Amino acid sequence: MKMPTRELKESPQTAAEGDARAIEHLKQAIARGRHWYLALLEAIKLWKSPQEDYKGRHYRYLIAGEAFDWLLLAERLIEEIDQSVPEKEKINLLFFDQPPLELSREEFKALIGPAKYKAYLNYLYGVLAEEALIAAVVDEIRKERRVLGINKEDDIVDKAYRRIYGEAQQPLLDSFRKEKKYPRRKSITLSESKEFTYWLFQYRIKKSERSRLASDIKKALAKIQRDSAAKRKASRL
């Protein structure tokens, strides 16, 4: 799934200029009457920086140079037009992944651009689906234990990791940090957690047989569909 993402790998000066154009386009498009969501996606297409520090927060939009977290960039850009975005629509998009307009895959791809769309697919399968796979296996183990009358929960995540990757979570995290030359810490940031999840996805791809990969992605996508249905229901409340 590796692909070029030159749009998010510009020089700092070029990236800053591109980001400024993106923000200006966003504001002007809305002022001309463009729907805020469409203007937002167009601004995402123009955006250049893979990460930035803004108002005391670090935003990392491109993970491992390949996976594009478009909703994180959407959150950042919405801050520029906060008064133009209905609160309910903002909450539905950022917390429930429910956009205010129905767009086809091709329409969404055209608005954010082919390169960012491909990088978004890397994020979808390498981060979101991998998180869903882990959650689905945790659910499986929990159900198995419930049938046996076992209520133990403290080792359930490690058991899920062993079932998926063959090792517990901490040794895998240690290997990831060693490979990336990151310091060993007791805690993990959200940004590092996403990169670790993408690393786990690549680790699993290398280690698993094709039939196992197909089974895993089916399980992950089923979990995503269930969660999406629950989010849609919650967003209507």
Image (cartoon, rainbow, N blue to C red):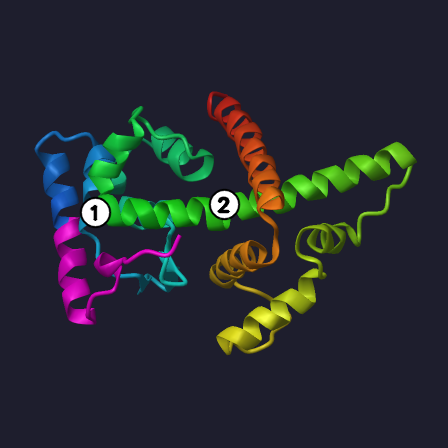
Q: Is residue 177 found inside the magenta-colored segment of the image? A: no
Reading the image, the residue beneath label 1 is 45
x, y percentage for residue 147? 87, 32
Between 217 and 15, the one nearer to me in the picture: 217
| Residue 216 shows in this picture | yes
Q: Which mark is residue 128?
A: 2
| Residue 40 shows in this picture | no
Between 197 and 208, the one nearer to me in the picture: 208
What SS does tag 1 mark? helix
Q: Which residues are magenta?
A: 1-23
Q: Is residue 150 left or right of residue 1?
A: right
Q: Amino acid at mark 2?
A: Leu
- At a point 68% along the width and 66% down the height, the residue shown is 170
x, y percentage for residue 16? 18, 64
x, y percentage for residue 53? 33, 65
Between 28 and 162, the one nearer to me in the picture: 162
Q: Is residue 90 left or right of residue 157?
A: left
Local packing at callout 1 (Cα closer than 10 Å; few below 14, some 14-19, many 20+) is: many
Q: Amino acid at mark 1?
A: Lys
Local packing at callout 2 (Cα closer than 10 Å; few below 14, some 14-19, many 20+) is: some
Q: Earlier in the sequence, mark 2 or mark 1?
A: 1
Q: Is residue 17 found inside the magenta-colored segment of the image? A: yes
- At a point 10% along the width and 41% down the height, the residue shown is 28
- At a point 38% along the width and 29% down the height, the residue shown is 88
